Image (cartoon, grey):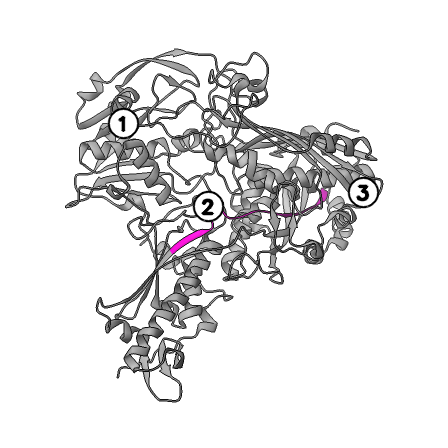
Amino acid sequence: MDHDTTSPDPLRFGSGQAVRRLEDQALLSGAGRYTDDVQPAGLTHLIFVRSPYPHARIVSVDLSAAREMPGVVGILSGADLAAAGVQPMPGTAGFKRPDGGPGVSPPRRALAHERVRFVGEPVAAVVADTIEQARNAAEAVFVDYEELPMVVDLAAAAAPGAPQILDEAPGNIAAEARHGSIDATTAAFAKAKHVVALDIVNQRVVALTIEPRVVLADIEQGTGRLSIRMSTQMPSGVRTSVCDAIGLPKEQVRVVVGDVGGGFGMKTGAYPEDIAVAYCAHVLKRPVKWVADRSEEFVSSAHGRDVSSHAELALDANGKILALRIHSLANVGAYATGTGVAIQLLIGPWVQTSVYDIQTVDFHFQAVLTNCAPTGAYRGAGRPEAIFMMERLMDEAARQTGIDRIELRRRNFIRPEQMPYTNPMKQVYDTGQFEKVMDQGLALADWSGFEARAAASKAAGKLRGLGIATFLEWTGGNVFEERVTVAVRPDGFIEVFSAVNAMGQGIATSLAQLAVDVFGVPIEKVRVILGDTDRGDGFGSAGSRSLFTGGSAVRVGAERTVDQARQLAAKEFEAAFEDVRYANGSFTVAGTDLKLGLFELAGKQPDGQIFVDSTSTVSGPTWPNGCHICEVEIDAPTGEVTVVAYSSVNDVGRVVNPMIVRGQLDGGAVQGIGQALYERVVYDSETGQPVTGSLMDYAVPRAEVSEVMFRTEMDESTPCKNNPLGVKGVGELGTIGATPSIVNAVADAFARAGLSAQAPKLQMPLSSARVWQALQTAD
């Protein structure tokens, strides 16, 4: 009998260990396989003709000259797609308008038909043999537009008499949501000793993935099916959208994802361009590829944030929070997508009260249509906006009441004995020790030693500020079921397929570690396969769900595989199932010297493998939380803000790979630094044209930001109770904590410099010009 003599070391490669990412060797050696690396025979290239106007009626589209250009194999307008029966993409659902009617959105088509509503909206698609031929032909397309009144500014769009984006949305309100009790909140504010009010802007930002969106659609040889290879986080969702738009059965479309150069939420779900590329390949019966350039991404990919809020906090004489009142306007752009609306009207509000014991609230959130690109998911998706508001209010309340900001937080934290805790949005926190995490954060950041550091900065002619954010977030994507397949093969490998998707976050390594935990084989024996709708459906990767749903599914699927293999081994041994033991890739029978290797057993099966198709469900979302503390220095003559220290303690439950988790936390913090100090999408209010259309105009964190000394620790003492791994989502936590801790640090520096009146007026991004201007104004 051929025994499995491998000598695995699961303690070295299993969960809890800082295993080097399995993905990196191929990526660092240039052997990665991104969508644009695939060059099938007969490949054609697609270029979009995009609207130069923010709002206009399409009078006519003349394709005749372009159609005669060299190399052109196909050309389409929005009218062509409408005539062919290609359906618009679904808009907002499940929300109401102020008049009680259902939420509304203009019909969003793969190519604009009859009207364009933002600069960059695709109007026509040109397919040619080469990119150059497609570009030349696109320039020959003549579109006759009749300009219409437009509005890109959020406040202006919601003001009386504003140009209407859609007749069915008076006041440009696509949808709204009310949460809490107006009467109870009004009563609480009436008896409050202190009322703190802030006007807060979470500015519009772009996701800026290293790899832009790329779509390659082709017809499979032999089957005639439509095959779409693309850079996306959610292949199953894209397939569904393409099928719904084009009218194909699900079985006739396959979506495959290779390496993805970043997603950050921007690559969730389908875009109009995806449907247009797919339709062209379906009609032309040739491979069609579209690669977005950076300028296209700036104007047409989903933007994030863009929320203006008036937030008020009522407190008693002892600093106990009595009530929270918020009215927010969210600029969802020209099309109110389901994701864009839900993020601001529901998901953000789920965490609005954060780690604080607040039950009396009055929330009023409105989704406003404008002639800007639509908004959607961007790292944190609603939670950064909510937590930013809450933490800015907490620090301002401390200044106005005279209560130390740490003490104010202590008096309002939800206590461990209150768990499970139901917040006013009916969301249930399963675990959390928020004060404990804060105390660890204070120690890590040497909070008590700040005064000496501030004195040193002052001696060097700098202002120094100290900021803190204590917070939680919700993770899950609101889909808690996941499917995996596990195949034990006779060639000595275990193939694990999951519908969660890689996008640079190292998920394949973490999933492999979880398989090692169960199978006890070397990690080199585990192959993780992702991104293929033929292998299995699933929600994909969004909302920091990949590990706690996908990882839990791998654990359950691996355990089911071992159980099935034990049954097969029992038959081989002619022994009772209860007597068969499994460890480190081999089966034995209690009380005997019989032994059989896992992979040898697989080879004995009729189909040459042991295969398990497993679907499992976690019982709810996770609530990761943390304390993030930031120190900044401000150069008063220039207004330049420098982050000089960043410390965080993060409760992400059980940690599968601490190296990957730290990378996610620190990388997320860098993106939060970007929003706090640099990034802002700007549209010209007079013309509706995007001003920040390239990296020449749009500032992002540069390499020197990585020189910040990130001190990042994890607290594993409160594992999540909603999944078998005990893990909590981690991918967005850093971004959520960074913006308030940095802005609070700048506000603290202002207050220490005698400019307390300016502190509540600070708005992101805190560019040098903005900070300098604020410093010129005395109390």
Task: Left or right? Give the position of 374 relative to 562.
Answer: right
Q: In which quadrant of the rendered view does residue 735 lie?
A: top right
Q: Main secondary structure of the magenta part?
A: strand
Amino acid type, label 2: Ala
* Residue 314, horizontal then vertical, whole percent: 77, 35
Does label 1 or label 2 sit earlier along the sequence?
1
CA neighbours of label 3 inside 10 A, class few (<14), some (14 to 19), many (20+):
many
Which residue appears at 37% of the width and 36% of the height?
Answer: 270
Residue at which label 3 appears: 319
Query: Which is in the foreground here, disc 1 or disc 3?
Result: 3
Q: Would you place residue 41 above or below residue 481 in this image?
A: above
For badge 3, the amino acid type reads Gly
Q: Which residue is mark 1?
A: 135
Among the two numbered marks 1 and 3 on one chain, the one whose residue lies closer to the N terminus = 1
In the image shown, does 96 or 472 lie closer to the viewer? 96
Q: Which residues are magenta?
A: 463-483
User: In the image, is residue 83 part of the stretch drawn in magenta?
Assistant: no
